Amino acid sequence: MTAVELEGIWKRFPGVIANAGASLSVRSGTVHAVLGENGAGKTTLMNVLAGVYTADEGSVRLDGVEQRFANPAAAIAAGVGMVYQEFRLIPTFSVAENVALGAAPAIVAKGAIEKQVGELAERFGLATEPGRQVWQLSMGERQRVEILKALWRDAKVLILDEPTAVLTPAEAEELGRITSAMASEGRSIIFISHKLDEVKAFCDEATVLRGGKTVASSLPVDELDPASMAELMVGEATAVSQRRVRTTEVGATALSVTNVTVVDVHGRHVVDDVSLSVGAGEIVGIAGVAGNGQRPLADALAGLTSLRSGTVSVSGTDVSALSPGDRNDAGLAYVPEDRLGVGLAPRMDAVENAMMRNYKTLGSGAFVDRKAAFDQAEGLIDRYQIKVGKIDAPLAGLSGGNLQRLLVGRELDGEPEVLIAAQPTRGLDVQGVAAIQNILVEQAAAGVGILLISEDLEELFALSDRLLVMHEGKIAANFDPDAATRHAVGAAMTGA
Ligand SMILES: Nc1ncnc2c1ncn2[C@@H]1O[C@H](COP(=O)(O)OP(=O)(O)O)[C@@H](O)[C@H]1O
Ligand SMILES: [Mg+2]
């Protein structure tokens, strides 16, 4: 039986068509993959199903009955639950409180709810401790709380938006077991991913989106192979518009990475003998499907984690043994993909966040020159057009685009020689993307060597002077973006 049927869904945003007649059909009791590269329209389509957006055109049917959700509450009432990429939990509440929030009788003993949440978790094999506060939990545990929230509301359809992006490999496998347990009860799970191996391992069928349209519907996963997947996801070779004029004269080597290996807590070589260099004024792109070592590489170059072997040099100085702060002083700036974790402190205000890099120069000991700090923050706000409500209010309320401008601005303010930018435009709206991309191009023109790690092929083709592909921890391929086809890059990304 068909549990979910989306047909001819159109959703437009100012200047963007996110869904252009997309369709999706999910049978009950199955795990259904929705595949597509970044920007394909996956999240938007799921937001239509989850009542976050209403479609401009098209129909949504659940068990054959036409629905038109006015809001997420209406979708939840009809049995659709969604676990978003960014979790929506209250850190200072317990697991049980988060699960039952707004969906339990007002006067029930705390212990009783904890017990019920514990039983529900056990039924689906979701390891959790109902009494613990959410801030104490790992990302994997937080995700299980989100899943429990949906199950608590008896979701018949559960949407997981790129759920494994935040998980360790072991947690991802665990999630696969949980989704099959839910499917075997007759529920339908929609699993958004761009990792072929986990789609093959966890899902029954797959639908592929490209450019807001459905390009393949309900393919049995056994019929998917890396080459056909790459073809479906990235399409035929297309000319990239708005490509930046390439750097013709690359300066001296700004960043040099030699035989770098990084090992994770499980002993896996997540970065495996990587060598690369970036010249002054050059943008070197790194493409890759999420989870192929890009993040550990960036963290290790910035000094947040240590190298198993190899060296990192900035303008000829070996920084391999230096702390992140000393690497920064040596000319290395880092925009991490985890904006509100590693990058910025959400509970602090713009002034405090702006001065995190150079607080040493703003005062001595405990005494910070508050006026100088304010001026610095105001300078950043002005130059990078950051919209902050109040300069001394916690950052947590700012939009993604403004957070990113603040982070990028702060990192560039120290006039680095090298900038490592990891997923710098992910999750931003169109204007935010353009603003950040323009800053990167300007900085390269001013002589900064930029290592751009991105999952957005369009962005990499548009900005990179050279394009590397990371696969399973290694640099698997090396392309000239002017000559390469997206198909060839896509194939290297999937290991074909
Ligand atoms: N709220 C929004 N406002 C403007 N544009 C948006 C919004 N949400 C998504 N988009 C744009 O719609 C397109 C599809 O986005 P999305 O559905 O998030 O893709 P995916 O989840 O496949 O990466 C992208 O170009 C994105 O920038
Ligand atoms: Mg998405």
Image: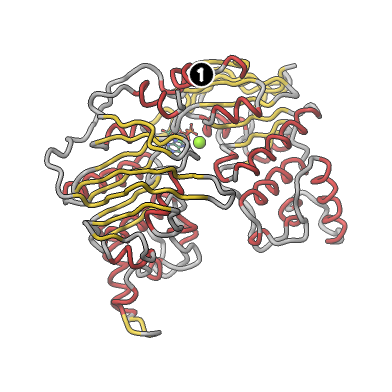
Q: Nearer the viewer, residue 447 or 403?
A: 447
Q: Which residue is mark 1?
A: 214
Residue 406 in the image, given as x and y percentages of width and height? 35, 58
Residue 8 in the image, given as x and y percentages of width and height? 54, 18
State the colouring used for the structure image. secondary structure
State the residue at coordinates (53%, 50%): 264
Q: Nearer the viewer, residue 135 or 151?
A: 135
**Mark 1, residues whose alpha carbon is within 10 Å: few (<14), some, or many (≥20)?**
many
Q: Nearer the viewer, residue 185 or 479?
A: 479
Residue 16 in the image, given as x and y percentages of width and height? 39, 31
Q: Residue furthest left?
A: 249
Judge whether 165 appears above or below 3 on screen: below
Direction from residue 473 to residue 52 in the image, left or right: right
Direction from residue 69 to residue 257 in the image, left or right: left
Residue type at mark 1 is: Thr
- State the SS at label 1: strand
Splitting the image into 4 quarters, where does residue 250 fall? top left
